[in-house]
Amino acid sequence: MKIIKKRLLVLLTVIIIIFNNIVTYAEEYEDAAQDSSDILSLQSKSAILMEASTGRILYEKNADEMLRPASVTKIMTLLLIFEALEDGSMTLDDTVTVSEHAASMGGSQCFFEAGEEQTVNDMIKCIEVASGNDAAVAMAEHIAGSEEAFVAMMNERAKELGMNNTNFANACGLEHEAHLTTARDIALMSRELITKHPEIRNYSTIWMDSIVHRTRRGESQFDLANTNKFLNQYTGATGLKTGYTSQAKYCMSATAERNGIELIAVIMGADTKEIRNSEAGKLLDYGFAKCSIYNDTETLPADLKIPVSNGTKDNVAYEQITGNQFVLIEQKPEMVIKEIVLYNDLEAPIYEGDVIGVVQYSYDGNVIHEEYIYAAENIKKLSYMQSLKGLFEKALMIQ
């Protein structure tokens, strides 16, 4: 009986040793898998890399973790400002009056006084270059009447852009427990700003500038220095916005362009400014190494005919495509297949600007880019009498 117990004890010990070895191996394997998945070995809490023209994600780390964005918030504030400029509800020369509330903002600021007036143009510089919280809130009030109303606009716009893990609580990024977003959502609003409003570069690339304070005490110059030192550290950097608070740590949405390729690198929760800038550069280097430009210089064939039925003309003239460029991501240009697809059911009336075909570019059986072909003229529909005349003429020709 004692011998059996000893054998059972030995067997149990062996089983425990084997089990422990299996667990240790599994843990080591899991760690190795995690290390290999994070090929860039970033230290920041969250990061994402996006190609701007397509919105394709090239790299991500904890990209959907909701974190504090600090002044990177101002990207949405700027987007709404440029949309207001676009729809004509204000101009760059309009006057913005700073309220008591806006002037009371802490953190990074341009030290406006209540009642002070500045142009929209100078306010944008203050927001983008100096990251002025007072300027951001003053513009929010100018557009929406109050910061609260503007924040509602920010959250509504976020929903429209598919920023599903974002909740804004203010217009500038000051600490608030409910003011949260993600690296992915920041990339989405950054893309919307730089692709729909490329004039942001007129501000995001400013290194040094100044505004003039006009108060009851007279006029004084206030110098603006760009908070984004990455501009002078990375070749091709074009912006976009930095941020820092003690809780958010160092954050940034960095944009850069090289050889026609534009990338967006978002870093959140870096422990130091140096780590943030270094890892943004690492992301961008990784992206530029993966991307190339496909350049199609061929025009549409001169003998291309696009038929129209029941029209005063048998074929419709088209607008010539003089050249086309788009970004390839880890794809070989020589493997791209081009095809002209004409809409074969076109029927009059046709109007200038109507889509009448498409040039498709495919890779490995999948369409990766399209360019529409547009009508260059109007073609009226045949009248009843014209149709009868056409039928009669065809009948005579047959005879």
Image (cartoon, helix red, strand yellow):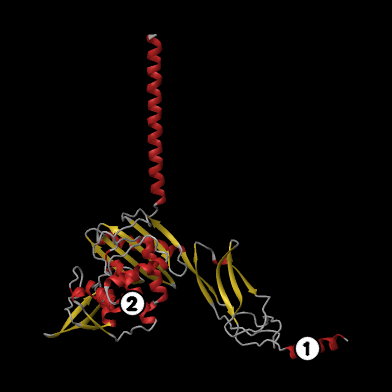
| Left or right of residue 182: residue 331 | right
Residue 247: x and y, percent?
23, 58
Q: Amino acid at mark 2?
A: Ile
Inspect this view and state whether residue 385 appears.
Answer: yes
Under circle 2, the secondary element is helix
Q: Residue at x 21, y 83 (%)?
A: 117
Q: Among all residues in the image, which is located at the extreme left?
A: 217
Count of numbered circles on the image: 2
Residue at the disc numbered 1: 388
**Foreground of the two, 147 or 249:** 147
Give me the C-alpha separation between circle 1 and circle 2: 58 Å
| Left or right of residue 317: residue 134 | left
| Left or right of residue 257: residue 384 | right
Q: Among all residues in the image, which is located at the extreme right?
A: 399
Q: Amino acid at mark 1?
A: Leu
Residue 93 picture quarter: bottom left
Residue 339: x and y, percent?
63, 71
Residue 110 picture quarter: bottom left
Q: Residues within 10 Å of mark 1 (few under 14, many from 20)?
A: few
Inspect this view and state whether residue 129 appears.
Answer: no
Q: Is residue 134 above or below residue 65?
A: below
Under circle 1, the secondary element is helix
**Foreground of the two, 58 or 295:** 58
In terms of sequence position, does the residue under pointer 1 or pointer 2 come before the other? 2
Q: Is residue 393 above or below residue 137?
A: below
Residue 280: x and y, percent?
33, 62
Report the mark closest to the observer, 1 or 2: 1
Residue 40: x and y, percent?
37, 55
Residue at the disc numbered 2: 81
Quarter occupied by the C terminus:
bottom right
